[in-house]
Image (cartoon, rainbow, N blue to C red):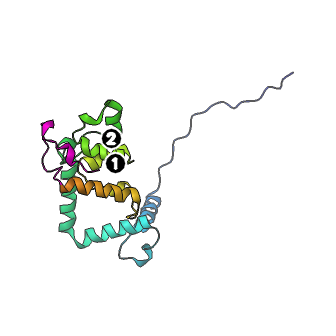
């Protein structure tokens, strides 16, 4: 025979008591003591994150005009649609390769093909092909052979004025002058 467990009846939970003003004041004081102050030497050196926050607070306090201009520039940049920003690739290299059977449809197909053909990641190759000098996406090491190769290819395209004007006519492309 199974033993029946005795269950307590469910009762309504008693409402929480109001917190006293003294307790609220103590909590408020405790939170204020946790705030960082760039003038307090004990707040520095705790972590890179807190040091960054302290540097920003110090800059904000010591340079209010520059801080305001930086904030307004950030807001303006965020308000600019991506389509209007200069040289912004409208697609990633991976998206382009997935949706096209050939790279001939790429707006900068010669550069895109050169970067891809030399083993550079499609997304990085696409960014470079749009004329953005972002070799840091390949590697932070200046001696990295892939970064050096991409730099040479990019420099050759830049020297021949590849990004100066975008031609609407395929006949204007001198295929003998494409750097390899």
Give the image quarter of residue 98.
Answer: top left
**Image-based side of 42 in relation to 150, left or right:** right
Provide residue 163's location: percent of width, then percent of height: 17, 49
Please tell me in which quadrant of the rendered image residue 67 appears: bottom left
Q: Quadrant of the N terminus?
A: top right
Viewer-proximal residue among 127 and 82: 127
Relative placement, left or right, of 2 versus 64 is right
Q: Is residue 178 visible?
A: yes
Q: Position of residue 145 (x, y in %)?
A: 40, 59
Q: CA distance from mark 1 to mark 2?
A: 7 Å
- Residue sitting at the far top: 1
Residue at (79%, 25%) from the top-left corner?
A: 4
Name the residue tied to disc 1: 124
Image: magenta residue range: 160-180
Q: Which of the pair 135/31 is nearer the observer?
A: 135
Is 21 located above or below residue 118 in the figure?
below
The answer to whether 90 is drawn above or below residue 1 in the figure is below
Q: Are marks 1 and 2 in contact (CB under 8 Å)?
A: yes
Instruction: Answer with mark 1 or mark 2, whichever residue precedes in sequence.
Output: 2
- In this orientation, which residue lies closer to the viewer: 26 or 67? 67
Circle on res. 9: none
Task: Name the residue tied to disc 2.
Answer: 93
Q: Based on the displayed image, in which of its 4 quarters is residue 3 positioned?
A: top right
Secondary structure type for disc 2? helix
Is 161 within the magenta? yes
Magenta span main SS: loop
């Amino acid at each position: 025979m199974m033993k029946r467990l005795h269950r307590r009846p469910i009762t309504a939970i008693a409402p929480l008591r109001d917190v006293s003003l003294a307790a609220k004041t103590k909590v408020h004081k405790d939170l204020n003591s946790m705030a960082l102050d760039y003038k307090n030497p004990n707040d520095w050196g705790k972590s890179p994150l807190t040091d960054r926050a302290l540097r920003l607070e110090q800059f904000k306090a010591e340079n209010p005009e520059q801080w305001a201009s930086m904030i307004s520039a950030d807001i303006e940049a965020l308000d600019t649609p991506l389509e209007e920003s200069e040289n912004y690739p409208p697609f990633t290299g991976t998206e382009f390769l997935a949706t096209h059977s050939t790279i001939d449809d790429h707006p900068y197909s010669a550069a895109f093909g050169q970067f891809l053909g030399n083993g550079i990641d499609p997304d990085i190759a696409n960014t470079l092909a749009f004329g953005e000098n972002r070799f840091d996406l390949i590697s932070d090491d200046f001696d990295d052979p892939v970064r050096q190769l991409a730099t040479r290819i990019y420099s050759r395209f830049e020297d021949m004025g590849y990004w100066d004007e975008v031609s609407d006519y395929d006949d204007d492309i001198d295929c003998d002058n494409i750097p390899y």
